[in-house]
Amino acid sequence: MGRINKYIRISIAAILAILYFTGQISGTMAIGAGIIAIIFLATSFVGVCPLYLPFGLSTKQKEVN
């Protein structure tokens, strides 16, 4: 997973957390947003998105030798 992809995922997780803690989302929406935020944070720190693997996708830049 590329650096920009990681930053986007962390940003989205932060926005979802802010929406929750400011009371903008609640109930079922808050639970769904929380699950998405946790998944985004986990995949950002691990550096691999399981959904990319079956399709052979990668956002990581190729190394130039």
Image: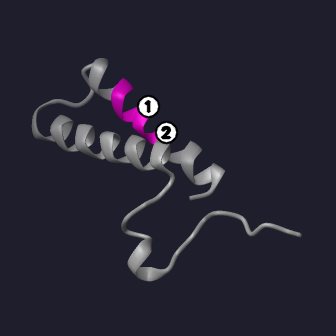
Seen in the picture, residue 65 relative to 34 is either above or below; the reply is below
- Depth check: give the residue in front, 5 or 24: 5
Identify the residue at the far top of this view. 22
Q: Amino acid at mark 1?
A: Ala
| Mark 2 element type | helix
Left-right relation of 64 to 7: right
The quarter of the picture where residue 61 lies is bottom right
- Left or right for 2, reference 10: right
Quadrant containing the N terminus in the rendered view? bottom right
Residue positioned most to the front: 65
Q: Residues within 10 Å of mark 1 (few under 14, many from 20)?
A: some
Q: Which mark is residue 14?
A: 1
Instruction: Name the residue rendered at 41%, 37% in the picture.
Output: 13
Q: Position of residue 27 (x, y in %)?
A: 10, 33
Residue that appears at 41% across and 41% down: 41
Image coordinates for residue 11, horizontal then vertical, percent? 51, 37
**From what the image shows, is residue 50 above or below residue 6?**
below
Which quadrant would the C terminus be assigned to in this image? bottom right
Dominant SS type (magenta): helix
Residue drawn at point x = 52 percent, y = 75 percent: 57
Query: Is 36 a magenta residue?
Result: no
Three-letter amino acid code at the position of disc 2? Ile
Q: Residue furthest bottom?
A: 55
Kindly indicate whether the residue at mark 1 contacts the one at mark 2 (C-beta within 8 angstroms): yes
Q: Which mark is residue 10?
A: 2
Indicate which disc residue 37 carries: none
Quadrant position of residue 37: top left
Measured as percent of width and height from the top left, residue 55 is found at 44, 81
Image location (x, y in percent) of residue 36: 30, 46
The residues colored magenta run: 11-18
